[in-house]
Image (spheres, rainbow, N blue to C red):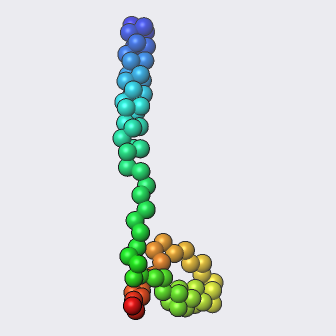
Amino acid sequence: MKTCTRILFLSLAVSALAACAGTQDKSTLSSATRVEAPSNLTVDDAYVARVEYMARQRGVEVHWVNMPTKHRTTSQ
């Protein structure tokens, strides 16, 4: 009975490892491709400076996830 349990446990472990090894290629297919912002967008430096100034006054640390942007006028 002990041998049968060991064989069952080992076969389940090997099956689980094989299943995990088979999914590795799928996760690498979606490589990180950077999407460029349109050329008429720029970081709103004035807004960033105001927010960071107010945060420093209050003792808060700011971590920007998405920098605020503004549309830049294109003159030809």
Q: Position of residue 61 (x, y in %)?
A: 60, 78
Whether residue 9 can be seen here: no
**Quarter-of-image position of residue 59:** bottom right
Q: How many marks?
A: 0
Nearer the observer, 17 or 67:
67
Q: Position of residue 55 (x, y in %)?
A: 58, 86
50 relative to 35, above or below: below
Q: Position of residue 29 (x, y in %)?
A: 37, 45
Q: Position of residue 47 (x, y in %)?
A: 50, 89
21 relative to 52, above or below: above
Nearer the observer, 71 or 17:
71
* Residue at the (38%, 9%) spot, across then down: 4
* Residue at the (41%, 81%) spot, across then down: 41
Query: Which residue, as the protein is rendered here, is positioned at the far front?
Result: 76
Q: Which quarter of the rendered picture does the N terminus lie within? A: top left
Nearer the observer, 13 or 22:
22
Is residue 70 rendered to the left or right of residue 45?
left
**Quarter-of-image position of residue 33:** bottom left
Whether residue 33 can be seen here: yes
* Residue at the (39%, 82%) spot, across then down: 40
* Residue at the (39%, 91%) spot, across then down: 76
30 relative to 23, above or below: below
